Image (tube, rainbow, N blue to C red):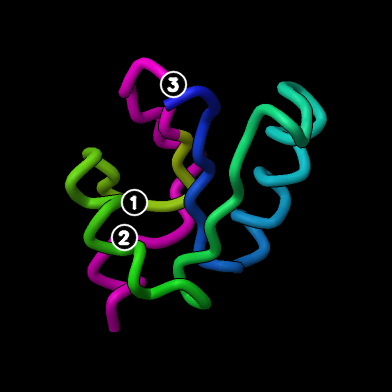
Amino acid sequence: MSKSIFYHAGCPVCISAEQDIVDLIGKTNVEVVHLGEAKNRIDEAEKAGVKSVPALLTPNGNVLHLNFGASMADVKG
């Protein structure tokens, strides 16, 4: 993986965090995945270790959970 993946669910907390992440690391360095719109990516996020969103998966595989917005159970529901 060459760039980070930012997973979110579209809530206000997530949107705010998305803007900050893009500002910090640059739009070309992060793939933004809205799990409410891309439900087929939920399993991928969970396998990577995402427990809640918003979360940033770094290129070396670390998951950074940012300001709790929603649990993965909420995202699936």
Amino acid type at circle 2 is Ser
- Mark 3 → mark 1, Cα distance in angstroms: 18 Å
Q: Specify which label sits upstream in the sequence, 2 or 3.
A: 3
For the record, the magenta segment spans 57-77
Badges 2 and 1: C-beta atoms under 8 Å apart?
Answer: yes
Q: Residues within 10 Å of mark 3 (few under 14, many from 20)?
A: some
Q: Under tag 1, what secondary structure?
A: strand
Residue ID for mark 1? 52
- Mark 2 → mark 3, Cα distance in angstroms: 22 Å
Q: Nearer the viewer, mark 3 or mark 1?
A: 3
- Mark 2 → mark 1, Cα distance in angstroms: 4 Å
Dividing the picture into quadrants, the one containing residue 27 is top right
The dot on residue 59 is 3
Q: Specify which label sits upstream in the sequence, 2 or 1.
A: 1
Q: Write the residue at 22% across / 61% down.
A: 43
Residue ID for mark 2? 71
Q: Write the residue at 24% across / 39% down.
A: 48
Badges 3 and 1: C-beta atoms under 8 Å apart?
Answer: no
